[in-house]
Amino acid sequence: MTAGQDEPIFDLAIVGAGPAGMAAAALAGEIGLSTVVLDEQPSPGGQIYRNVEHAGGVPLPGASREKGAALAAAFRATALDYRPGTGVWHIETHPGEPCRLWLLRDARVGQVRARRVLLATGATERPVPVPGWTLPGVLTVGALQILLKSAGMVPAGPVVLVGNGPLLYLTAVQLAAADTRVAAVLETGAKADLRAALRHLPGFVASGTWRAGLALLREFRALGLPVVRDVSEVTIEGGDRASGVRYRTADGQSGTVPAEVVALHEGVIPASSLARAIGCDLVWDAGQATFRPEIDTWGQSSVAAVQIVGDSAGIAGAEAAPLAGRIAVLEAARAVGRLTEAERDRRAAPFGRALSSLLRGRPFIDRLYPPRLARSPLADPVVVCRCEEVTAGAVRAALASGASGPNQIKAFLRCGMGPCQGRFCAPTVTRLIAEARGVPEAEVGSFRLRPPVKPIPLAAFAAAMEEDAP
Amino acid sequence: MRTADVIVIGGGIHGCSTALECRRRGLSVILLEKDHVARHASGVNAGGVRRLNRHPDEIPLAMASAALWQSIKDLVGDNCGYRQTGQIRVAETEAGLEAIAARRALVEGLGYSHEQWIDRETLFGLVPAIARHCLGALYTADDGYADPSRTTRAFARRAAALGAEIISPCRAGIPVRTGDGWQVPTDRGPVSGAAVVNCAGAWGGAIAAGLGEPVPIEPVAPMMLVTARVPPFIAPVVASFDRMISFKQSPNGTVVIGGGWRGRAEPEANRALVEFGDLHRLIGNVLHLFPVMREARITRSWAGIEGMMPDGIPVISPSATAPGVVHAFGFSAHGFQLGPIGGRIVADLVETGKTALPIAPFSIERFQRASWREAS
């Protein structure tokens, strides 16, 4: 096994090569930290700048291709141990010892050790558990986009998009470009959301992130797709697979749209599985209605050797992520003795100013596109945990019979124990408990995660052992 | 102040079984649990309901407990996921065969017949997926497994239904003698009772020490793995005389793998951490014994905190220093099967100071004896 007592101990291991990871790595290299970058993708860019090094790569909303390409170029130009196609499935952190990162690359388990770890694992789509969301034919818009991009799998039948936010509009534009019939866009934004958001408009304008957003919105409107606004309830109908979407708006209109594919999206939340499995403390972010890792201004988590940056620490977008990554690297350099505190502060100051300015734009987006279906009351028959097929009713019954927290729900129902490790059900379980107990979600907490954060074939361990054999 | 005849410290299977049995005998019970029922070892162990290969001193207790498992549903109102699939311990080498021969001589010499020798062909018939280098096995056909968390909660639920007061989360301190009874300080105010039962598992040593009878208990964290579901391919629970492994497929298709590999126990932080360096070796053992597992995927790993005694058997004993206190802890990573009988033994000790079962080997005083000190 590449267990490596004799392997080098890196100063810094960066997990993720999206905008935060790329920028952090480039600066780490410049400062002279010995750095390893571990990323699941075959090339740098992360989700938002996927394929940015190639002409065809189209960035996601809120990101400019030029900026992504520049980050990737600077990243490539830096002397680093860059390991694409490498998943990190667990990190062992013990005070006074180097961190041990467990990897999966080319179907082989491996390890690296590093004094510090920077998690830049990005965002994941918020689960939207509506009746019928587990039927075949229902997916997230992110999954739909990947289908579109890889192998150009275009849905033959009508597609219905449900939810809100820039990614939903972008997907509509992309589907139209691929000659797919979008039967309807059911927008779950409410009029009240716009009013709530307007209060934060000045910050948004000042942040400068509005230009790209406005252009996308114009492009979306120009398509002239059937749009239903202020949708407050959705049921996906179908027997073996999705056949249509029944909806109701806040002012009482209702209807049914036939659909072969239904794509759900109500924004993204931090991809925090690794942080949770390591045991980093979480805080409830009321503005984004999600738990996120608790960090200070340097990205420092509650675990001494671990910093968290970019969207994985709280959704702030692709412009903010590189700044947060650089700020964190400066602190990592201080922690390993490469920079003095004064140097760190001096170099971080401009990044900090730029970051605060950008972050002023965030509340506008958060208020404009809040999760609605994902925060609506859940009927008992709705499936909460897809892996173990646990319904909202079963969770409520377990609560009534004495379970009081997320980890007990796990023990009672196996909810969250499947291959996804609760990625799809954790927010819902927390919400159901909060409702039943009449306490805030912040007080309920979330599942403890158990490594590996992604399923690992036993053969991957065997491959490492065979490699190791004399 | 809340008062009961018996204060039970610890909401694991032995604490909950004790609470249930004391209620069945009409004693009032308060059970104090610092986290929630079945939080640690009782909730996360492998769930083996096993007599096979027990320490000889434990066999009489395991036999008596096995009889209670037969009617577990009558006892606690739930079948606890109990299945008598058999337990098998294979020999893979000549050394393993010699270990089987020695074991058979020992067990048969004590007059027991629950552990049977099975030859290769019988083994391959029972476990078609096992590697063909295996040479034979010991087999107990009516051993099996249960769902540990569900079982422990069922004991707690039945105890509560019979009137036991279960307080959690509630951390107990060291009991203090008051008159002819005991007062137990807790973070939610003191409780008092005529008797105190220490079923605090890995934390039981601290209570014993506080009562002036320290024991050499070590908190350990046996690690477990579970895979994603695979089609059913094996019924019995399998272990080996030649390597550290325990292996079973749950009714839902997941495969649960353990075998005593230890992670990091941090009882003060109330947690146990897995370490994949050693799990890596466990996975090697799995593939050696079950090549069919190559394509299975590991979805989760965990460890629970157990109290390990240096001689590998628990303390089940009246206190030698504190009249009215009974200890039942340190089950050394194999206390689950003993849960049903453990509650009865402790209730006997609470009521009368003695029990019909042979518990002398589990005395807390054994660590004070000269013979022990010399040996260690």
Image (tube, coloured by chain):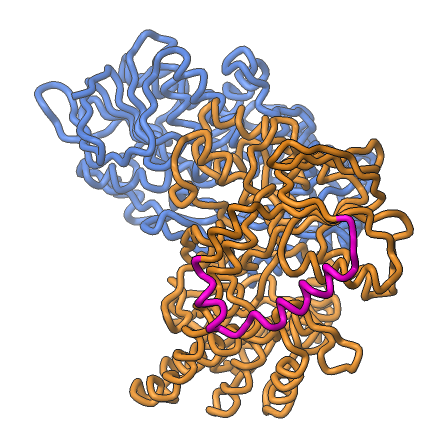
Chain colours: A orange, B blue
For the point 75% across and 34% down, the residue is A255
Q: Main secondary structure of the magenta part?
A: helix
Q: Quadrant of residue A215?
A: bottom right
Magenta region: which residues?
Answer: A199-226
Is B190 above or below relative to A105?
above
Q: Nearer the viewer, residue A204 or A263?
A: A204
Is B322 above or below relative to B28?
below
Residue A20 coordinates in the image, percent (x, y): 54, 75
Magenta stretch: includes residue A210:
yes
**Which residue is at the far top?**
B26
Q: Quadrant of residue B294?
A: bottom right
Is B139 above or below relative to A441?
above
Is residue B329 shown left or right of residue A57? left
Q: Nearer the viewer, residue B150 or B343?
A: B150
Is A80 above or below relative to B91?
below
What quarter of the picture does the N terminus of chain B occupy?
Answer: top left
Residue A177 coordinates in the image, percent (x, y): 84, 64
